[in-house]
Image (cartoon, helix red, strand yellow):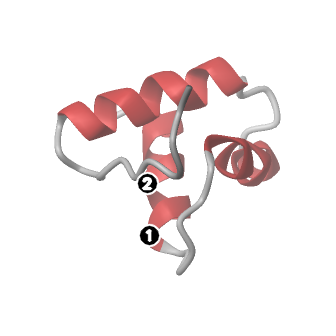
Amino acid sequence: MTKQRKTILEILRNTTCHPTADWIYEQARKVIPEISLGTIYRNLQILTQEEEIQELKYGSTF
């Protein structure tokens, strides 16, 4: 598992809220300043596919 993925999982495990990708990005930059928002989205998708995390969708989309 990559450092980025481990960091994202640690952030998610240590929060009681349902964070957005942007929030995770801000938290991850404290640990890995060079991480990009694209890396966050890519890793969230992988973690969802591996069933490590569950995606929550808010509201309706048009």
How dense is the environment of label 1, judged by Cα within 10 Å: few (below 14), some, or many (20 and up)? few
Measure how far apart labels 1 and 2 are at the Cα level.
6 Å
Look at 43% across and 54% down and name the residue there.
9
Look at 44% across and 39% down and name the residue there.
5
Residue under label 1: 13
Q: Is residue 2 visible?
A: no
How dense is the environment of label 2, judged by Cα within 10 Å: few (below 14), some, or many (20 and up)? some
Q: Which mark is residue 9?
A: 2
Q: Is residue 58 left or right of 25 when viewed as pictured?
A: left
Where on the picture, by quarter, is residue 32?
A: top right
Whole-percent x and y of residue 28? 69, 47
Q: Nearer the viewer, residue 35 or 38?
A: 38
Q: Nearer the viewer, residue 42 or 60?
A: 60
**What's the amino acid at mark 1?**
Arg
**What's the amino acid at mark 2?**
Leu
Q: Is residue 16 left or right of 53 when viewed as pictured?
A: right
